[in-house]
Amino acid sequence: MAEEKVMIEAKNLMKYFDTPRGKLHAVDDISFKINKGKTLGVVGESGCGKSTLGRTLIHLLESTGGQIFFDGKDITNATGKEILELRKQMQIIFQDPFSSIDPRMTVSQIIEEPFIIHKTYKSKEEREKRVLELMRTVGLDERYVNTYPHELDGGRRQRIGIARAIALNPSFIVCDEPVSALDVSIQAQILNLLMDLKDDRGFTYMFITHDLSVVKHISDEILVLYLGKMVEKTTSDRLFENPIHPYTRALLSAIPVPELSYKGKNATVMKGEVTSPIDPPPGCRFAARCPIATDRCRKEIPEFREVEENHFVACHYCDGSAYNGINDQYRKDAKGDECIDVNVVF
Amino acid sequence: MNEKLLEIKDYSVTYTTDKVEAHAVNHINLSLNKGEVLGLVGETGAGKTTTALSIIGLLPKYGVKTSGEIIFNGQDLTKIKEKEYRKIRGNDISMIFQDPMTSLNPVFKVGDQIADVIKAHNPKMDQFDVTARVNEIMQMVGIPPERKEEYPHQFSGGMRQRIVIAIAIACNPHLLLADEPTTALDVTIQAQVINMMRELQNKLQTSIILITHDLGIVANFCDKVAIMYAGEIIESGTLEDIFDRSLPHHPYTIGLFESIPNINEKTDRLKPIKGLTPHPSELPEGCKFHPRCPKCMDVCKAGANPELYVDGTHCIQCHLFNNN
């Protein structure tokens, strides 16, 4: 829709790391847009470049190539002061609430720090008032204001991380696996908090996770990554109704579902494990594990193309022919999960 | 056929420090038949790992008070000497630890680490047979035996966990304790490891206690389920007893199921359990769950533990079901 404003856009974003063994392609040619107030879920296995993508986007890492637009402005080559200015608008919530906050600072010092760095308030009283306000917003009791992080449990610590991230009222927040270190009952509390904040303040999120059930719950659109490459991107509902790429399908079928009908069912198992992202071979990066890979996949990089409205897939064989046989095979292997069972019709 | 392999009776563990006593496990009762897979479910600090360490006799020597019995194959494990325990540990009972990155020794070849267990329990076996057995086990867990000359860092997470499993099953144990064996792994690798464990279980007829917080894996793999909260088993039964939503359940079990985002339906908000798990040194009076319980009544707040409601194989520890 035309009236929807694009909050952040990545164009052919690349991030390579130099290693003694060659170039590590952590983020390779990734493009997407997130509209204001929407959530993009980024999923993939460990080492697929999810976190690197999030960090590159908000300038915690310098990109190797490509462009980043924030609120219509090109921020790819922002430096020094510009970055500091951007930090007011883009924030990140880290994965591990145990190592991402300074153990020597009290809760109030941690939450207050952004105000000091950005000189937002003149007096200490104003800052303190705001800290208490933030603590209430994220559901932290006021009595914790002078405690140290080690006295608190994971859920409360993650609330500190969230309070710090929203302190400057940013418009875009990267959530880098904010709940994966937490217990299920606490995980639900934090997810609800993030969604409440989004509704109240209109935040735009990029939600990085490896847990597909969480991502379905929270995202409007989902981007699936494999070894730094985009594999599939579509709306959250569509991805679960009609996953097209063989990797997405395998990923979906591997989720254990807590229902009786899943007893004793074997998940579709992909052979092998993620290959090395250092100087990856030409062709589709998933080819080594793909059940339908052919010689073409090993030589030619599949284009990321739109196969139906707002549904992008990077696979040579997502156009019917080769799929017929494979669908049957998936149906046989899968746990009876309906999302695997759908027919791909083009 | 339904031969009892393990029975835990009224077993408790208390860790003591100078200042506080932490009641990690409180009067639990558990039983496991041969060839069964039991899922032990609970959140951090519920006492799952302490229970497993008790069974295999690896609790710290000092600062720990235990009571009750653990009967394994007719023998009370709480009474035997360390020397005898060493014969059982690794041979009849073995354990898979949570983190495959830290449970292997980084300076020994993986093949040697597997051979260690075999040699320890079969001191008279000659080197040739040991090597043959190592090869056989590596094949069983899906790692080419040529790789036995490699070191743990040369393997990926999933492969390392397979090696840990290989070590655990090297002596064909009767009971395998798997402490969150897949928590550190990606979903696709997790599926591989679970499938492999299922195949091994079918082949070897080992009993398994699978400790996890993932109800999906339990549904997929286990025959029996016990749900732990604050050191107590608050609900137990067959997989059907626990996962059939039409049966009565402990409010904590219901909360646990509701706080997982469901992949098959889209909800606006999740329904978390309010509050936090109590610290084992500050357990509340009465029912341990009452401060968080949506159905808390006056009787729950003080006095003894609720009586067990029993319906066939299904047991629930909650006042809700004891009104008559």
Image (tube, coloured by chain):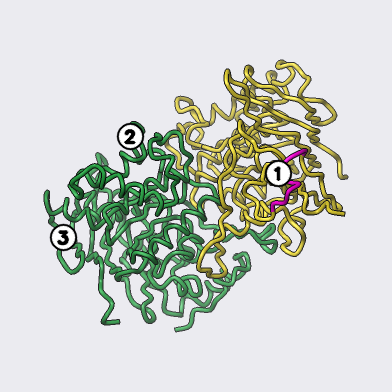
- Evaluate whether residue A136 shows in this view: yes
On whether residue A135 falls in the magenta region, the answer is no
Disc 2 element = loop
Q: Which residue is mark 3?
A: A75
Q: Give the residue drawn at x 70%, y 61%.
A: A260
Q: Position of residue A215 (x, y in %)?
A: 45, 62
Q: Residue at 75% across / 36% down in the picture? A: B28
Mark 2 nearby-residue class (10 Å; few <14, some 14–19, many ≥20): some
Q: Is residue B128 visible?
A: no
Identify the subunit bearing mark 2.
A
Q: In front: A121, or B294?
A: A121
Q: Residues within 10 Å of mark 1 (few under 14, many from 20)?
A: some
Q: How many marks?
A: 3
Q: Where does the image place residue A247, in percent across and percent down from the top left?
A: 45, 63
Q: Chain of mark 3?
A: A
Give amino acid for label 3: Ile
Q: Which residue is mark 2?
A: A105
Please state which amino acid type lies under the numbered disc 2: Met
Q: CA distance from mark 1 to mark 2?
A: 37 Å
- Category of crowding for the residue at label 3, using alpha-carbon neighbours closer than 10 angstroms: few (below 14), some (14–19), many (at least 20): some
Residue A314, horizontal then vertical, whole percent: 36, 69
Which disc number belongs to residue B301? 1
First reached walking from the N terminus: tag 2 or tag 3: 3
Mark 1: amino acid: Lys
User: Which shade is chain A?
Assistant: green
Q: Which residues are magenta?
A: B296-304
Please tell me whether residue B162 is drawn above or below residue A303 in the rendered image: above
Determine which quarter of the picture holds residue B107.
Answer: top left
